[in-house]
Image: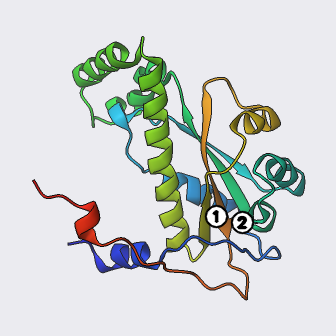
Amino acid sequence: MMPTSIQSLIESRASTQHFDPERTISDAQVTELVHLATRAPSAYHLQNWRFYAVRSPQAKARLHAVAHRQAKVLEAAVTFIVCGTLGAHAQLAQALQPSVAAGLLPQSVSDTWVAMAQSSYGADAQLQRDEAVRSASLAAMTLMLAAQGMGLVSGALGGFDAPGVVQAFGLAPQELPVILVSVGYSAADASPQHKPRRPLHEVMCVV
């Protein structure tokens, strides 16, 4: 059974559509949100994600233009462009080195993981993309729960022009924009909508 605090965060979270544009969040809060988001799991500990924190009025305007002009991009204190990174297996040895140095992962295990990742992803561009989307999605959900735990609200945006985002923010070729997550404070006249979920018997199968 989940601890009450975690259960409360999950059950209280709701997607926010209208943010208070007058309320900002600090640099420390933005940093902490990304720090907590990177606690999400990833295959082989690839950590194949990157986060762009869109905060300035100029950057918000650029993102607004390629996100179907959704108002929350302008209103929220920050909108994160959550990217999955392609070709992460090529840097896996480097990514695992801190764990090896800390004695948490034997060098032999690290070497095995690197070889396995190279074998799995090296010649499979689709698998690289699938893994990038999985990792970025896990990180985005973790970020939203982190925001909830910090007394903030969030809203995920899947509607955006991905090539437009790449161009507007100069994303690297290996950075795949997967989802946008707006974070801030809810507008005073906006109340969270905890919409009913489908019955469990429709979505769960015990085998």
Give the quadrant of residue 28.
bottom right
Give coordinates of residue 7: x percent, y percent.
34, 75
Give coordinates of residue 65: x percent, y percent.
84, 49
Colour option used: rainbow
**94 to the left or right of 205:** right
Query: Is residue 7 visible from the viewing direction of this image?
Result: yes
The residue where tag 1 is placed is: 29
Which residue in the rendered view is the most extreme toward the right?
58
Q: Residue at x 28, y 34 (%)?
A: 103
- Numbered disc 2: secondary structure: loop
Identify whether 11 is placed above or below 40.
below
**104 to the left or right of 160:** left
Q: CA distance from mark 2 to mark 1?
A: 5 Å
Identify whether 205 is placed above or below 150.
above
The amino acid at mark 1 is: Gln
- Numbered disc 1: secondary structure: helix
**151 to the left or right of 204:** right
Q: Residue at x 41, y 13 (%)?
A: 122
Which residue in the rendered view is the most extreme toward the bottom?
189
Identify whether 23 is placed above or below 120.
below
Q: Residue at x 23, y 24 (%)?
A: 109
Identify whether 107 is placed above or below 14.
above
The residue where tag 2 is placed is: 26
Q: Residues within 10 Å of mark 2 (few under 14, many from 20)?
A: few
Give coordinates of residue 9: x percent, y percent.
43, 75
Q: Which mark is residue 78?
A: none
The amino acid at mark 2 is: Ser
186 and 94: which is toward the camera: 186
Give the quadrant of residue 168.
top right
Q: Are marks 2 and 1 in contact (CB under 8 Å)?
A: yes
195 and 167: which is toward the camera: 195
